[in-house]
């Protein structure tokens, strides 16, 4: 074997999955208000945002778990034929709310819809694992075991024995935990039960091993 020749061996891909408890809720909220004057739109949107934050606080959401992700104020236009028509000015903001634990999420969504005020919209609710590290560890164990079993089978079919592991490469598989997504409208004022189940955490690794003989 020359100095530049790769040593004989085998490279396999192993895949593993594990279940992670869904216990983190991320709620995307929007406030959008249109008025004839920009100052009026801003004032109404500010009042709505204040009521919305108060409703969240009353439901036990910590202020550090609420983040304003966007503020807007500008003209609102519509096309009439081939011409743009100014219909007013739109003001608003987008909020991201995060909380651990699912207790009270039905009441929170209902209160946001009923008490948030004019222009409130629930853009979406994402339920994901808050602590997926244990599941990731289990998924890696399963992925390595899968790669090892494949390598041993292929080596046996070739009449060879396996040697040391040369390298391991881990790549994301399936984009990480798969959340349950649902969209709700602010008009939905009735409480709704939330069924979560577990999220699947996936790991994919590539393992390269030498032949021992």
Image (cartoon, grey):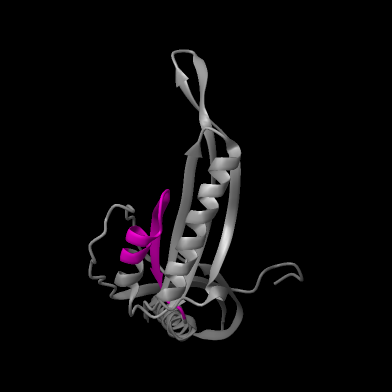
Q: What residue is drawn where x is 34% and y is 54%? A: 186
Q: Position of residue 15 (x, y in %)?
A: 42, 73
Disc tally is: 0
Q: Nearer the viewer, residue 136 or 65?
A: 65
22 above or below 46?
below
Q: Nearer the viewer, residue 66 or 132?
A: 66
Report the side of 207 relative to 145 (left or right). Answer: right
Q: What residue is drawn where x is 64% and y is 74%? A: 7
- Span shown in magenta: 110-130
In magenta segment, residue 5: no
Q: Position of residue 176 (x, y in %)?
A: 46, 68
Q: What residue is drawn where x is 59% and y is 73%? A: 8
Outermost residue, right direction? 3
Report the side of 17 relative to 164 (left or right). Answer: left
26 above or below 37?
below
Rendered image quadrant of residue 24: bottom left
Q: Quadrant of the N terminus?
A: bottom right
């Amino acid at each position: 074997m020359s100095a530049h020749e790769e040593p004989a061996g085998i490279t396999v891909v192993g895949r593993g999955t594990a279940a992670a408890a869904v216990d983190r809720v991320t709620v995307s909220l929007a406030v959008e208000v249109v008025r004839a004057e920009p100052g009026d739109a801003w004032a109404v949107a500010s009042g709505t945002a204040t009521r919305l934050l108060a409703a969240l606080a009353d439901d036990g959401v910590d202020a550090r778990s609420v983040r304003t992700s966007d503020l807007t104020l500008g003209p609102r236009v519509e096309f009439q034929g081939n011409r743009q028509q100014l219909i007013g000015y739109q003001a608003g903001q987008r909020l991201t709310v995060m909380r651990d634990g699912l207790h009270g999420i039905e009441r929170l969504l209902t209160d946001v819809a009923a008490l948030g005020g004019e222009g409130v919209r629930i853009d979406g609710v994402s339920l994901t694992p808050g602590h997926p590290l244990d599941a990731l560890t289990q998924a890696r164990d399963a992925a390595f075991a899968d790669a090892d079993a494949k390598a041993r089978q292929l080596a046996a079919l070739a009449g060879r024995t396996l040697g040391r592991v040369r390298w391991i490469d881990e790549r994301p598989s399936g984009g990480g935990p798969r959340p349950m997504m649902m969209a709700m409208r602010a008009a939905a004022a009735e409480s709704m039960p939330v069924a979560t189940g577990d999220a699947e955490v996936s790991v994919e690794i590539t393992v390269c091993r030498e032949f021992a003989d």
